[in-house]
Amino acid sequence: MQALNNTWMPDAAFQFPLSGKRNLKFQYSWFARFTWLSYSKEQDGAFCKFCVLFAPQTGVGRNNQRPGRLVVTKYDKWKNALQAFHEHQLTDYHNDCVKAAENLQKVARRDPFG
């Protein structure tokens, strides 16, 4: 449960590093827009906290592809981030992972003696 509820979250004053030719960076406002989004300071990249924990390692998506960016590897192409994040949250496997996380949280909240 800690991996779901205690994901590291930088404060609003955190200075995300600039990267690439255009000196783009992760935007703090994306956390409000995509509640599943997490950021790795060590890797300077974005991940989907639900898919990292619940996506099958054998294959996801239409063609049963191996999980990639946002799941197994960081996403750091900031120029296209909003589009990529939007597309990610529309995938069936992402929605399955969100449901798995919700179900786990429901089970964890149940009173076994109630």
Image (cartoon, helix red, strand yellow):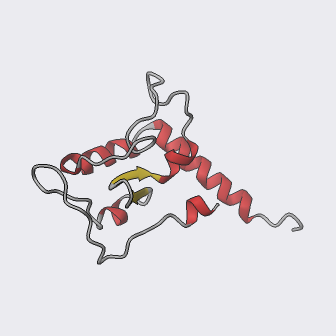
The picture places residue 8, in percent across and down from the top left corner, at: 47, 66
The picture places residue 35, in percent across and down from the top left corner, at: 42, 60
Q: Quadrant of the C terminus?
A: bottom right
Q: Quadrant of the N terminus?
A: bottom right
Instruction: Single out the residue that lies furthest toward the front.
Output: 42
Q: What residue is at 30 percent from the left and 67 percent from the top?
A: 28
Q: Seen in the image, is 100 located left or right of residue 34? A: right
Instruction: Single out the residue that lies furthest toward the top.
Output: 63
Q: What residue is at 41 percent from the left and 51 percent from the top?
A: 47
Quick one: 73 or 53, which is closer to the camera?
Answer: 73
Q: Seen in the image, is 96 located left or right of residue 26? A: right
Q: What residue is at 58 percent from the left and 59 percent from the top?
A: 3
Quick one: 51 or 95, which is closer to the camera?
Answer: 51
Vertical position of residue 45 compared to residue 67: above or below: below
The picture places residue 64, in percent across and down from the top left corner, at: 48, 24
Instruction: Single out the residue that lies furthest toward the left.
Output: 22
Q: What residue is at 34 percent from the left and 53 percent from the top?
A: 45
Q: Seen in the image, is 106 located left or right of residue 38? A: right
Question: For the image shown, how many numbered marks are present on the structure?
Answer: 0
State the image quarter where residue 13 is shown.
bottom left
Q: Seen in the image, is 17 located left or right of residue 40? A: left
